[in-house]
Image: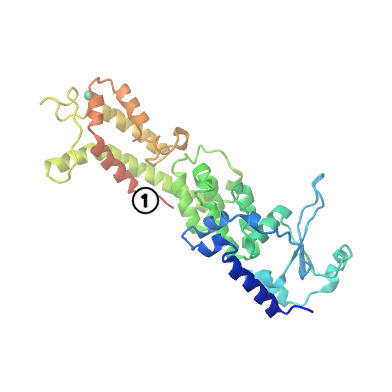
Amino acid sequence: MTLSYLDFYRDYNQHQHQQRCYHPHKSTHLPTENAYEDLDEVDAQEYPVYDFTSSDADVILVSGEKGKENEGPYPRQFRVHKCILGAASPFFNDMFSLPEPVSNWEGKREEMEEALPVIPVTETKETLDLLLRFLYPIPNPRTDTLALPELVSLIAAAQKYDFPSVLGVLRALLVSPRLGFLAQDPLRVYAVACRFGLEREAREASRWTLRVNVIEAPLEEELKWVSAWSYHRLLGLHWRRAKEAREVVERWYAVVERAKEEGAGSLSPPKCVQCNGSPFTIREEPKWWVEFVKRAKEILGRCPTTEGPMELGGVGGGVFGMTFLEEVVKACGCPRCAGSVLGAGTFLKGLKDEIDRLPDTV
Ligand SMILES: [Zn+2]
């Protein structure tokens, strides 16, 4: 007796009903903002590993390596389905709508056991394998250990073969906090985003580059692919923001003082009992503030963000971090200025907010 589709479905349905929940995580999983990130956590071990050797495949992709020693057979064949590739990619859809010029593949076909169309591609087997795993309706590949160059190869392939759905996932990975490329290598991420015309990601990355002195940063491989236009845009952002941030710091004491005199604003300029506590010195700025302005302008000139340069540890290492303020007090030469700094919390917070409001993306 042969089973019909309907019999097969009926048996399966009955089994499902008895089991109640075959894949509990699937029945309770609700899409969220980070749907991809959540899906990535799905335990792939629950599923048999799909290895692109399906007997019902109707086309073979062959990876493009020349071959490396001791690493098994090269290049690798991927038995895939025209309908999946065609549905996901206008490029493949167009290709498969053409009559196949059989003779072109004849040479390769002799190496194959059967007569399926063979498409040799230039991507490595690793890139092709990951690309197809993102594409096929199977669990997404784990991305925890994905390195930036691997992601770049994937983006290049997804763009080349016109897989918009895969490209969407890869774009999210490029700026994903979980993978941390932005925090570790903002300039490289900016370069990658510019290379592939990913404007949204380029803007996001440009904000993160503010923690890096672009001119002094190491010459990264990814920068080879950046146009002068994109690079100039980034330098322009840094230059403008550095200039404006330095000006905000330079003017801040006078701005707050004037607002106070005019009865506007809730901030007060800091006073030090020794530096500017007497009627004779009341118009002067406390020594710590003079030192703060000098040092903050230097740091903001290099890295125009209140989060501080990456080499100082980023967040908390900036001109509003305790380390920086301690150094300022030590260097200013007034033994009473420490007390003044301690009372200047809202004054400094106001300055930080003012700098943070400056445009921070290309
Ligand atoms: Zn003082």
**The residue positioned farthest toward the left in the image shown:** 279
Q: Is residue 89 visible?
A: no
Apparent side of residue 94 relative to residue 259 in the rendered image (left or right)? right
Q: Is residue 181 visible?
A: yes
**Ligand 1 lies in quarter:** top left
- Looking at the rendered structure, the secondary structure element under dot 1 is loop
Apparent side of residue 230 relative to residue 125 in the rendered image (left or right)? left
Image color mode: rainbow
Spot occupied by residue 221 in the image (x, y as percentages of width and height): 61, 44
Q: Is residue 296 above or below residue 109?
A: above
**The residue positioned farthest toward the right in the image shown:** 110
In the image, 253 versus 80, the foreground residue is 80
Mark 1 closeness class: few <14, some 14–19, many ≥20 residues within 10 Å: few
Residue found 42% across the figure and 45% down from its top: 238
Return the residue at label 1: 359
Q: Is residue 192 above or below residue 25?
A: above
In the image, 48 versus 138, the foreground residue is 48
Apparent side of residue 103 relative to residue 135 in the rendered image (left or right)? right
Apparent side of residue 301 relative to residue 352 in the rendered image (left or right)? right
Spot occupied by residue 112 in the image (x, y as percentages of width and height): 86, 64
Q: How many marks?
A: 1
Spot occupied by residue 52 in the image (x, y as percentages of width and height): 74, 61
Q: Is mark 1 within 8 Å of ligand 1?
A: no
In the image, 288 versus 40, the foreground residue is 40
The quarter of the picture where the N terminus appears is bottom right
Spot occupied by residue 67 in the image (x, y as percentages of width and height): 80, 50
Residue type at tag 1: Pro
